[in-house]
Each structure stands twice: as structure tokens, then as C-alpha cells.
Amino acid sequence: MTHWLELDPAAQAGQIAALGFPRFRVGQLNRHLLTHHSFDPDTWTDVPKAERAALAELAPNPLTVVRAPSADDGQTIKTLWRLADGELVESVLMAYPGRSTVCVSSQVGCGMGCPFCATGQLGLRRNLTAAEIAAQVIAAAREPAFPRLSNVVFMGMGEPLANYGPVLASIRLIAGPMGISARGITVSTVGLVPRIDQLAKEGLPLTLALSLHAPDDELRDQLCPLNRRFPVAEVLAAGRRYFDATGRRVSVEYALIDSVNDQTWRAERLGRALGRRWAHVNLIGLNPTPGVKWKASGRQAEFVKCLAATGISVTIRDTRGQDIAGACGQLAAAD
Ligand code: SAH
Ligand code: SF4
């Protein structure tokens, strides 16, 4: 059965009418889920007790917590979720001064096969539904000790643009009734060019992150096998078009790997390939992944210096959650 959160307003009204409940239950149920972040019918106190079970059947919580270890003095929580069919996914909640960010999964596993990424090693098991994605955000917004949830990043398990429809439907809930600004939502992709162009036309000021990791096709073919279909120049041209269409500066993600992609000539080449108006670079230290022999680069400072000398703005991503395998590329949902 289609989850309540995936129904359009007319279909939601139809379900409520079929139960013989008053029409305003539609708005009440949506508020409980998306504004009060509660799937628990016992908290829906403005709904008569006799009606709550039927509503909860339309809108069950698609996620059950398996475990939720914390790190960074309680400022990071990685939650392992079990889905209704037994599959497992993870999300990571991070507190910053005055606000929080949640990193959500969009697929169980990933079919893109990047060899440095733990999720890629699972292969693609299935796509998540919009309700399963939105429920990760709802759970994050509900977390009591955390500041206001302001940012959602699609940087957990999966390639979001390979699950386009459900990802967009979840974003329309998050940026709509949940009230999180579209500017605070980042969609990270390994470079599905046609889907980047489609995203640019959605009329949403989302932040796009391009996982590049190499400025040259020879190396990127190996680090991101999708590069053989959509090479560096095409991915960057799509990023540029995204900026032109939305006015949103694109974040180019680059995980520095020791003696693989951390040479100063690659920093210069990367800087030359990007435009300072439309792109900025976010460097990530490679996080350890079981079975991966590569290590984080020790030449980050030199790389930053060379890149900055080309005029491109550079930031360095923090290593939140590394000790609970909650950092980028470490999400593998092993039970
Ligand atoms: N599939 C999407 C989003 C999920 S991956 C994408 O690839 O963009 C989120 C980010 O983590 C990407 O930038 C990805 O390249 C990066 N990443 C993957 N494995 C990593 C690792 N072992 N260390 C650091 N970053 C990694
Ligand atoms: Fe998939 Fe992104 Fe991991 Fe590549 S880096 S395997 S695209 S999740």
C-alpha cells in the first residue's frame, strides 16, 4: 500500500473519506507527521482514540531503530534503521552551534561501484521510497537534545539521482510542509548528467554537490566508474548549467587519497577546470573503509595552497563520526 506521505492531497482526502472520518483529519495527520515529527498515534491527542489506529495504518513509521551510537561528545549520532522488509540503512545527525544537519540515505547500497566507498561495496539492493527518506529527516527533527534541524544532505548510502522520483518527492515534503529551506538541502551526485539537468529545472534552490575526486578522466575512470559514461568535462559542464539555471554555487567534492589524487599538478588542473563564480571545492579526508588499501593524504595543506592559488574557494570537511564509521563513505549498514 502506498504510504500516506506519498499520496497527493486528493488521494489523502479520498482515504480519509473512505474511512468515514471528517475531512480535516487530513491536515491533522500531516501536521502530526511533518510539523510535530510524530508517527506515534498515542501523541495524536486531537484525534479521537477510536480513529487513531486506522490513521496509523495509513501512515506507519517505515523505520525501526536497530542501534544509534553517538560520537564527538554526543554531537553526532549514527542511526542504523531497519526497513519493513528487513533491509538496513543509516543516517547521521550532527549538531553544530544553533543548528543541526542530517545526512540521509537514498538507496540500500549503491550500484555505482566507487572502489573507495563502503556503500559501493554492497552493490545496489534497492531504492528507498519517499516515505523512507522523509522518515529519516522526521526522526532527526524529533531528536530532543539537538538544535533545530536546518540542513539535510543526501550524502548517506546511495546515489540520490539514481532514485530520482522518490528523492524529489521526499524533498518536496522536507522543503514544503516540514519547513526546511531548500537552500539547506544538498543533493550529492557522482555525476548523472541528465538527472543534474532535470534537477536544475525543478525550480528549487537546492545545493548541488558533485563528487569529482579527480580532474582527469584517466584517474576518475578508476575512482568513479560512472565517469566512463559521463566524463569530467561533461559533469563539470552540467554543474555549470546547474549554477546558470538556479544561481546556486556548486560544491565540488574531492576526497584526498594518499599518492592517488593528491598531487599539486592535479590541484592546479582542478582549479583551472572550475570557474570561481560557479564552483567551490570541499576537500574530504579519505575515511577508512574495510578492504580498502588507500589512506588519507598527508599532503592536504599543499593541495589547498595550490588550489587556492588558482582563485577557487576551498573548504575542508570535518571528520564527524569517524570513530563510529559514520563519516562519508563509511556507511555500510552491517548488522
Ligand atoms: N552517491 C553520492 C552521495 C553519497 S556519497 C555521491 O557519491 O556523491 C557522499 C560523499 O562521500 C561523496 O562525495 C563520496 O564521494 C564521499 N565518499 C565516499 N567514500 C568515501 C570515503 N571512504 N572517504 C571520504 N569520502 C567518501
Ligand atoms: Fe555510490 Fe556515492 Fe559511494 Fe560512489 S561514492 S559508490 S556513487 S554512494
Image (cartoon, rainbow, N blue to C red):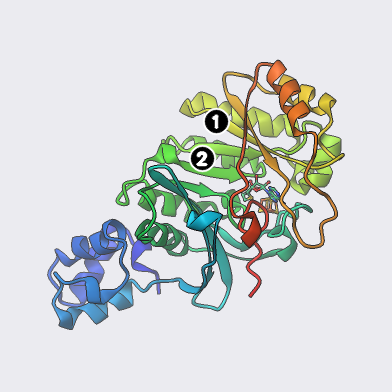
Apparent side of residue 246 relative to residue 295 in the rendered image (left or right):
left
Packing grade of label 2 (10 A; few <14, some 14-19, many >=20) is many
Give the Cα distance between marks 2 and 1: 8 Å
Q: Secondary structure at mark 1?
A: helix
Apparent side of residue 262 relative to residue 131 in the rendered image (left or right):
right
The kind of residue on which mark 2 rests is: Leu
Q: Is residue 197 above or below residue 39?
A: above
Apparent side of residue 190 relative to residue 243 in the rendered image (left or right):
right
The kind of residue on which mark 1 rests is: Tyr
Q: Which quadrant of the figure contains the N terminus?
A: bottom left
Residue 239 image point, x, y percent: 61, 31
Residue at the image position 82 percent from the left and 37 percent from the top:
261
Residue at the image position 45 percent from the left and 61 percent from the top:
136
Pointers 2 and 1 in contact (C-beta within 8 Å): yes
Give the number of the disc on residue 199.
2
Residue at the image position 14 percent from the left and 65 percent from the top:
23
Residue 76 image point, x, y percent: 51, 55
Choose between 319 and 237: the one closer to the eye. 319
Residue 85 image point, x, y percent: 53, 78
In this orientation, does residue 55 appear?
no
Residue 247 image point, x, y percent: 47, 25
Q: Which quadrant of the figure contains the C terminus?
A: bottom right
Q: Is mark 2 within 8 Å of ligand 1?
A: no
Q: Is residue 297 above or below residue 117?
A: above
In this orientation, does residue 179 appear?
yes
* Residue that badge 1 annotates: 242
Residue at the image position 52 percent from the left and 24 percent from the top:
244
Give the number of the disc on residue 124.
none
Picture quadrant where residue 151 is located: top left
Q: Earlier in the sequence, mark 2 or mark 1?
A: 2
